[in-house]
Image (spheres, rainbow, N blue to C red):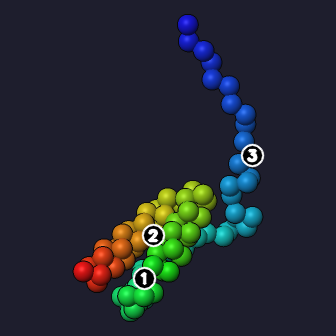
Amino acid sequence: MPTTIVKAIRNLEDHVPADPNEQVQAHSGSDDAELLESEIPRRVGELREKMKLAAKALEFEVAAALRDRIVALEARFIGLAR
Protein backbone atom coordinates (compact mmCIF):
# COMPACT_ATOMS: atom_id res chain seq x y z
CA MET A 1 0.00 0.00 0.00
CA PRO A 2 1.46 3.45 -0.94
CA THR A 3 2.46 5.78 1.88
CA THR A 4 2.23 9.54 1.96
CA ILE A 5 5.51 11.41 2.24
CA VAL A 6 5.51 13.86 5.12
CA LYS A 7 8.13 16.63 5.17
CA ALA A 8 8.52 19.75 7.22
CA ILE A 9 7.87 23.08 5.50
CA ARG A 10 11.08 25.06 5.17
CA ASN A 11 11.33 28.80 5.47
CA LEU A 12 12.26 30.13 2.02
CA GLU A 13 13.46 33.43 3.47
CA ASP A 14 16.65 31.65 4.57
CA HIS A 15 17.54 31.11 0.90
CA VAL A 16 16.80 34.58 -0.47
CA PRO A 17 19.19 37.54 -0.25
CA ALA A 18 18.25 40.11 2.41
CA ASP A 19 18.18 42.88 -0.21
CA PRO A 20 15.68 41.95 -2.97
CA ASN A 21 17.66 44.06 -5.47
CA GLU A 22 20.87 42.19 -4.68
CA GLN A 23 21.88 39.76 -7.39
CA VAL A 24 24.98 37.70 -7.88
CA GLN A 25 26.73 38.93 -11.00
CA ALA A 26 28.80 36.88 -13.40
CA HIS A 27 31.03 39.13 -15.45
CA SER A 28 32.38 38.18 -18.82
CA GLY A 29 35.60 36.67 -17.51
CA SER A 30 37.85 38.77 -19.74
CA ASP A 31 40.30 39.15 -16.86
CA ASP A 32 40.54 35.34 -16.63
CA ALA A 33 42.76 35.40 -19.72
CA GLU A 34 45.34 37.49 -17.85
CA LEU A 35 45.64 35.07 -14.91
CA LEU A 36 48.95 33.44 -14.16
CA GLU A 37 48.99 29.64 -13.89
CA SER A 38 49.45 29.85 -10.12
CA GLU A 39 46.36 32.08 -9.74
CA ILE A 40 43.92 29.78 -11.56
CA PRO A 41 43.10 27.42 -8.63
CA ARG A 42 42.29 30.40 -6.37
CA ARG A 43 40.05 31.96 -9.02
CA VAL A 44 38.25 28.65 -9.57
CA GLY A 45 37.55 28.48 -5.84
CA GLU A 46 36.16 32.03 -5.84
CA LEU A 47 33.97 31.29 -8.85
CA ARG A 48 32.64 28.10 -7.24
CA GLU A 49 31.55 30.09 -4.17
CA LYS A 50 29.84 32.68 -6.39
CA MET A 51 28.17 29.89 -8.37
CA LYS A 52 26.78 28.34 -5.18
CA LEU A 53 25.47 31.72 -4.02
CA ALA A 54 23.84 32.33 -7.40
CA ALA A 55 22.15 28.93 -7.36
CA LYS A 56 20.97 29.49 -3.79
CA ALA A 57 19.48 32.83 -4.90
CA LEU A 58 17.77 30.99 -7.79
CA GLU A 59 19.90 32.86 -10.35
CA PHE A 60 20.43 29.78 -12.48
CA GLU A 61 21.58 31.62 -15.60
CA VAL A 62 24.30 33.37 -13.59
CA ALA A 63 25.29 30.06 -11.98
CA ALA A 64 25.54 28.43 -15.41
CA ALA A 65 27.73 31.26 -16.73
CA LEU A 66 30.02 30.89 -13.72
CA ARG A 67 30.14 27.12 -14.24
CA ASP A 68 31.22 27.68 -17.86
CA ARG A 69 34.02 29.99 -16.70
CA ILE A 70 35.15 27.38 -14.16
CA VAL A 71 35.24 24.66 -16.82
CA ALA A 72 37.25 26.90 -19.16
CA LEU A 73 39.75 27.81 -16.43
CA GLU A 74 40.14 24.18 -15.36
CA ALA A 75 40.74 23.12 -18.97
CA ARG A 76 43.33 25.86 -19.34
CA PHE A 77 45.03 24.83 -16.09
CA ILE A 78 45.17 21.18 -17.13
CA GLY A 79 46.59 22.22 -20.50
CA LEU A 80 49.25 24.36 -18.82
CA ALA A 81 50.19 21.59 -16.41
CA ARG A 82 51.05 19.15 -19.20
User: Whole-Å distance between the Cαs marked 2 and 1?
Assistant: 14 Å
Residue 59 horizontal/vertical position (percent): 54, 61
- Quarter of the image with the N terminus in it: top right
Residue 63 horizontal/vertical position (percent): 49, 64
Regarding residue 65, the answer to whether it shows in the image is no
* Pointer 1 local density, CA inside 10 Å: few below 14, some 14–19, many at least 20: some
User: Whole-Å distance between the Cαs marked 3 and 2?
Assistant: 27 Å
Amino acid type of the residue that numbered disc 2 sits on in the rendered structure: Leu
Residue at image coords 48%, 80%? 43
Task: Say if mark 2 contacts mark 1, CB within 8 Å.
Answer: no
Check residue 40 in the rendering and tell me which mark sits there, or answer none: 1
Q: On the image, numbered disc 3 is attached to which residue?
A: 11
Amino acid type of the residue that numbered disc 1 sits on in the rendered structure: Ile
Residue at disc 2, secondary structure? helix
* Pointer 3 local density, CA inside 10 Å: few below 14, some 14–19, many at least 20: few
Residue 65 horizontal/vertical position (percent): 42, 68
Residue 18 is left or right of residue 52, and the answer is: right
Residue at image coords 45%, 70%? 66
> In terms of image quadrants, where is residue 49?
bottom right
Task: Say if mark 3 contacts mark 2, CB within 8 Å.
Answer: no
Q: On the image, numbered disc 2 is attached to which residue?
A: 66
